[in-house]
Amino acid sequence: MGRMSPLHNPAAGLTSGLSVAPASRNGGSSNADVNGAAIDLRGLRGVHFTLAIGALTGAAAVAARLQTGDNLADSANANWTNVNYTLYSNAQVTNKTNANTTFEMDYVPGAGQGNQIRAVLTPEANVSLASIVYTTY
């Protein structure tokens, strides 16, 4: 048997990181987005995100979505747009009210699609504890 590629032996080709740090967030009336770290997927196959929701108070809800950027050299000045949810049905998590649970999102760029990606966390209401981690492959 020859040498296996990372696709055959996934653990050899995985890199994980923190996209949105765990923190207590108050969606309140503003529902302010928390932008995750930009990830450069050049030379990689894709990325898997995990939204972790801890404690929730009252009627708290949490949402998340993926966005692609157009400026690989300078993510701070990129124009970020939501991933096409028709093509990537697993690129968003909407209004979750389940405490102590996880939800997953994935992105594998196709031809002509953005190679820079980030997750965006939106605390919808009240106080929640949430974070997003990623694994590239």
Image (cartoon, helix red, strand yellow):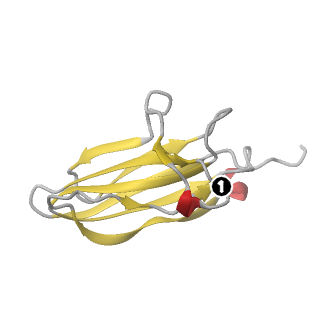
Please provide percent x and percent y for residue 104.
43, 47
Work out whether 110 lies above or below 38: above
The three-letter amino acid code for the residue at tag 1 is Leu
Residue at 88 percent across and 49 percent down: it is 3
The residue beneath circle 1 is 72
Q: Is residue 36 above or below residue 68?
A: below
Residue 133: x percent and y percent? 47, 61
Image point (58%, 60%), residue name: 75
Secondary structure under badge 1? Answer: loop
Between 95 and 103, the one nearer to me in the picture: 95
Tell which residue pokes out farthest to the top in this image.
Answer: 86
Q: Identify which residue, 22 or 71, lies in the foreground.
A: 71
Place residue 57 in its image quadrant.
Answer: bottom left
Q: Residue furthest left?
A: 58
Measured from the top left, where is residue 110 in percent x and y? 64, 34
Q: Quadrant of the N terminus?
A: top right
